[in-house]
Amino acid sequence: MVVIPAIDLKDGRCVRLRQGDMSEETVYSEDPPATALRWEGLGARLLHVVDLNGAVDGQPRNLTQIEAILKAVSIPIQVGGGIRTLEAVRMYFSRGVKRVVMGTAVLQDRVVLEQACKEFPGRILVGIDAKNGLVAVKGWKSLSNTTVRELVGTLKGLPLAGVIYTDIARDGMLEGPNLSSLKDIVDASPVPVIASGGVTRIEDIRAIKALGARIEGAIVGKALYDGKLDLHAAMEAAKGQGSG
């Protein structure tokens, strides 16, 4: 299992939000490439970059910073936030991004997801952001009528890289992940799962890993930035025993 530091971009800066609320931000850096280099220097093998403005606006908004991050580090990065067209998918891959995360488009334009998977097999992640068991879209501004399990069930047969599951209520709250919901996703998902939201302690990493071989990784944000979780220690815990 891999521990994946998150770099959330808003207005060109590296921030963290509380429960996805754009007005509840903490600015951690004015220099996103330096932040990316910091995590790479501490041993990160993969970075998770989110264009928060893009997620709300429906199109890339922090491309300059993402390109700077790509130039700064040698480890792969995956990018999400406002990627709702095949053109946006192609654009990010042409810039050197390893994997892209599609969320809103998965529910609202299934054809785009299927075309992206066909063109880039094994490089598309589906971001499933949940609130009370329902899938949230448009930068978490809207709640759909689709349950997480329903959406996961529709992914069978697609050549996806995996699913990123975020419990919005836990995101940025430092309260630990929602392990019961995460277990449901792991049991239902036909593809590997990456956990996101609330990962705060070494015990959280171990508990996520214990959910089985289908767990590919855990995205960590606020706990790393606040110094509550040591990246090296988290990566050691993620190696642990068994598969991963």
Image: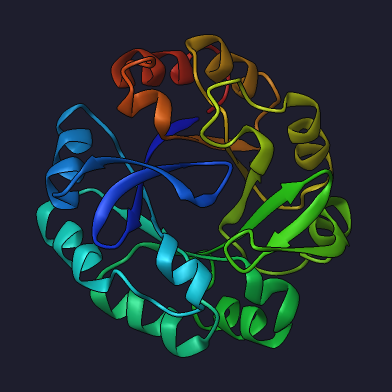
Q: Residue at x 76, y 47 (%)?
A: 131
Q: Quadrant of residue 241?
A: top right
Q: Position of residue 148 (x, y in %)?
A: 82, 52
Please, which residue is most extreme toward the front here? 23
Count of numbered marks: 0
Q: Nearer the viewer, residue 161 or 185?
A: 185
Q: Horizontal placement of 137 versus 58: left or right?
A: right
> Does 130 appear above or below 142?
above
> Does 86 appear above or below 93?
below
Q: Horizontal placement of 178 versus 12: left or right?
A: right
Q: Nearer the viewer, residue 85 or 214?
A: 85
Q: Position of residue 12 (x, y in %)?
A: 24, 61
Q: Position of residue 175 (x, y in %)?
A: 60, 20
Q: Residue at x 65, y 46 (%)?
A: 165
Q: Is residue 74 visible?
A: no
Q: Position of residue 237 (x, y in %)?
A: 45, 13
Q: Is residue 193 visible?
A: yes
Q: Residue at x 44, y 80 (%)?
A: 59
Q: Horizontal placement of 41 versus 85: left or right?
A: left
> Does 184 appear above or below 106?
above
Q: Nearer the viewer, residue 168 or 42?
A: 168
Q: Residue at x 78, y 42 (%)?
A: 185
Q: Quadrant of residue 61?
A: bottom left
Q: Quadrant of residue 150?
A: bottom right
Tell me how the rendering is colored: rainbow
